[in-house]
Image: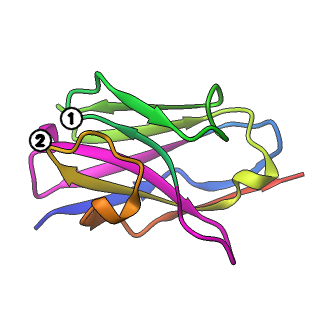
């Protein structure tokens, strides 16, 4: 059974850093594009970043460019989101999602598999 489990969230002060992890199990990660999404209370879910199957292609939302870095280790079946220079507006539940042979889309509706999410809270 395909499963994604996020970890690494927490409470951090503005300007701080966190690294989120997405652990994959039950499937071969190599064949899946992985996206990171977030949803803040009262707001729509938004795409944060995504990475292609090989890692050769990445995309970022304008709001996180230059601050967040996505990476993957297919051998370890892990995907990471390094978040630096965090701002209070980054506060949200962060989800990773998988799309088979995806081309790294930033639209959540194109991802059929989702993790349960991890809370990130950035205090001012």
Outermost residue, bottom side: 42
Highlighted magenta segment, given as a residue range: 19-46
Residue 21 belongs to the span the image colors magenta? yes
The way the protein has been coloured in the rendering is rainbow
Q: Position of residue 119 (x, y in %)?
A: 59, 63
Identify which residue is drawn at 22% across, 53% down.
99
- Distance from label 2 to label 1 (Cα)? 6 Å
Outermost residue, right side: 124
Q: Are marks 2 and 1 in contact (CB under 8 Å)?
A: yes
Structural crowding at the residue carrying mark 1, measured as other residues with C-alpha within 10 Å and reported as few (<14), some (14–19) or many (≥20)? many
Q: Which residue is mark 2?
A: 31
Q: Is residue 112 left or right of residue 119?
A: left
Q: Nearer the viewer, residue 26 or 60?
A: 60
Secondary structure beneath label 1: loop
Q: Which residue is mark 1?
A: 53
Q: Position of residue 8 (x, y in %)?
A: 52, 50
Q: Position of residue 97 (x, y in %)?
A: 33, 57
In which quadrant of the rendered view does residue 73 lie?
top left
Q: Nearer the viewer, residue 50 or 74?
A: 50
Q: Is residue 48 left or right of residue 64?
A: left
Residue 120 belongs to the span the image colors magenta? no
Above or below, comparing residue 87 to residue 2 in the picture: above
Identify which residue is drawn at 10% across, 53% down.
27
Name the quadrant of the N terminus: bottom left
Q: Position of residue 28 (x, y in %)?
A: 9, 45
Q: Is residue 122 left or right of residue 118?
A: right
């Amino acid at each position: 059974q395909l499963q994604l489990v996020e970890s690494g969230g927490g409470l951090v002060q503005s300007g701080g850093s966190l690294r989120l992890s997405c652990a994959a199990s039950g499937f071969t990660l190599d064949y899946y594009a992985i996206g990171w999404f977030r949803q803040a209370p009262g707001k729509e879910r938004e795409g944060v970043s995504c990475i292609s199957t090989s890692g050769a292609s990445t995309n970022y939302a304008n709001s996180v460019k230059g601050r967040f870095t996505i990476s993957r280790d297919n051998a370890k079946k892990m995907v990471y989101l390094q978040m630096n220079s965090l701002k209070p507006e980054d506060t949200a539940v962060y989800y990773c999602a998988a799309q088979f042979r995806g081309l790294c889309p930033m639209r959540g509706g194109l991802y059929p598999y989702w993790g349960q999410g991890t809370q990130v809270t950035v205090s001012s």
